[in-house]
Image (tube, rainbow, N blue to C red):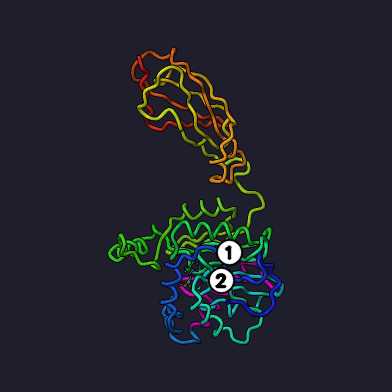
């Protein structure tokens, strides 16, 4: 198990330093193979000449990543600081950083990588290793670290896993703690060509697990904001590099600038209604009013809001009202002539922004 020494970080389960839950074998198998020998493990970051070169890259950084020095400086770290690296590999950065901080924790999906890391840091007393299982840091308590970083890792992850690591990083950081993340920029001409080239080997079932992946700058910034980070510096070259701080207030705690969103559960498109019917669904993001229109102009009335929706709540944890975001309007068919009609379900938020929850088209047929 990847742990040694005594750490001041509090673990959820004191003895279990390996994350529980489903093991995402794809990542682990691929990276264990990539780390099959020490030379191969070193080369996963950059083709390395020798150990002096590897140490230099760990300390000073290189064309693809910052090193320990830059990260320590950005994080304002010192001998009392606790640091976590996600996807630490063979502890290229960790070995150098350990000398400048209180505790350095390296977490990785690949036990094989961590074996190399342990050997590379032999004799360094303040390094600790943890085997991950996919995209959670569930062995760490909230607010455990002063600094969290993932260097040359996110470009090997599916977006969902990248985003989960951002949420988890936010959780395990202390208030005001800092973080660094990077990935390849889809829209830089050079990396865009790399992406085009990578098509050949990565289609359908032939996809390589550890392939390089890409994001755009607005996309990464949006994930960071959503996860609760303030971006202090954002470098946008071939590499997207985000230097961040844990926000004290989530931006969307007040106003996110976006219109409401939601769903119409009923009536179903092109269904036939006989007698009275109900327009039902859910809507989120400070909705103050939902009006149902027929054929673009005839108001059928305003829906009752705030109805319980226990099925929706857990899917949208950032919206405190998500458990009670249901709406319902009872419509008497007497107000509509027999035949085809379209419905619009207009949700309006407290800032006056509105959206049609029915989208492009919701048709019903009123039975004669
Ligand atoms: C290119 S290496 C970078 C290593 C190290 N960060 C460095 O800069 O030297 C990518 C690392 O990410 C790890 N990794 C890949 N997928 C992962 C995942 N889902 N969760 C955690 N680590 C992962 C790999 O095992 C590998 O050690």
Q: Is residue 269 above or below residue 236?
A: above
Residue 255: x, y in percent? 59, 40
Which residue position holds label 2?
A: 107
Horizontal arrangement in the rendering, residue 288 relative to residue 49 (left or right): right
Q: Is the magenta stretch mostly helix, strand or loop?
A: helix
* Residue at image location 58% in from the left, 29% down from the top: 305
Inter-mark Cα distance, 2 to 1: 9 Å
Q: In this rendering, does residue 8 appear at all?
A: yes
- Name the element at disc 2: strand
Instruction: Answer yes or no: disc 2 within 8 Å of ligand 1.
Output: yes
Q: In this view, does 5 lie above or below 306?
A: below
**Magenta residue check for 68:** yes
Residue 200: x, y in percent? 27, 64
Residue 361: x, y in percent? 37, 29
In the image, farthest residue toward the front:
274
Of the 4 image quadrants, the one containing the N terminus is bottom right
Horizontal arrangement in the rendering, residue 169 relative to residue 365 (left or right): right
Of the 4 image quadrants, the one containing the C terminus is top left
Q: In this rendering, does residue 145 appear at all?
A: no
**Magenta residue check for 75:** yes
- Name the element at disc 1: loop
Residue 298: x, y in percent? 44, 17
Horizontal arrangement in the rendering, residue 145 relative to residue 200 (left or right): right
* Residue at image location 42% in from the left, 60% down from the top: 185
Which residue position holds label 1?
A: 137
Q: What stretch is highlighted in magenta?
A: 54-78
């Amino acid at each position: 198990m990847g742990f040694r020494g005594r750490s001041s970080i509090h673990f959820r389960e004191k003895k279990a330093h390996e994350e529980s839950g489903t093991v995402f074998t794809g990542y682990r198998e691929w990276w264990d193979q990539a780390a099959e020998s020490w030379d191969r493990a070193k080369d996963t970051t950059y083709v390395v000449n020798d150990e002096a070169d590897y140490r230099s890259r760990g300390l000073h950084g290189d064309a693809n990543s910052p090193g320990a020095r830059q990260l320590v400086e950005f994080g304002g770290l010192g001998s009392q600081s606790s640091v976590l690296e996600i996807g630490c590999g063979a502890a290229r950065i960790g070995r150098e950083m350990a000398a400048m901080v209180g505790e350095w924790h390296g977490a990785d999906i690949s036990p094989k990588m961590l074996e190399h890391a342990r050997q590379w840091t032999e004799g360094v007393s303040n390094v600790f290793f943890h085997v991950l299982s996919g995209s959670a840091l569930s062995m760490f308590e909230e607010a455990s670290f002063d600094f969290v970083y993932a260097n040359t890792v996110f470009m090997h992850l599916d977006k969902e896993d990248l985003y989960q690591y951002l949420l988890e990083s936010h959780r395990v950081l202390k208030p005001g703690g800092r973080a660094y993340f990077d990935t390849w920029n889809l829209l830089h001409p050079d990396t865009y060509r790399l992406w085009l080239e990578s098509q050949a080997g990565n289609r359908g079932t032939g996809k390589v697990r550890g392939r390089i992946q890409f994001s755009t700058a607005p996309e990464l910034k949006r994930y960071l904001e959503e996860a609760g980070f303030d971006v202090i510096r954002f470098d946008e070259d071939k590499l997207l590099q985000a230097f961040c701080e844990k926000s004290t207030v989530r931006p969307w705690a007040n106003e996110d600038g976006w219109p409401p969103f939601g769903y119409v559960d009923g009536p179903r498109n092109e269904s036939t209604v006989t007698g009275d019917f109900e327009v039902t669904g859910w809507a989120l993001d400070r909705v103050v009013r939902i009006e149902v229109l027929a054929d673009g102009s005839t108001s059928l009335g305003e829906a009752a809001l705030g109805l319980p929706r226990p099925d929706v709540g857990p899917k949208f944890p950032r919206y405190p009202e998500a458990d009670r975001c249901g709406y319902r309007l009872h419509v008497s068919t007497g107000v509509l002539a027999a035949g085809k009609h379209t419905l619009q379900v207009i949700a309006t938020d407290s800032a006056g922004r509105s959206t049609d929850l029915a989208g492009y088209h919701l048709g019903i047929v009123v039975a004669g």
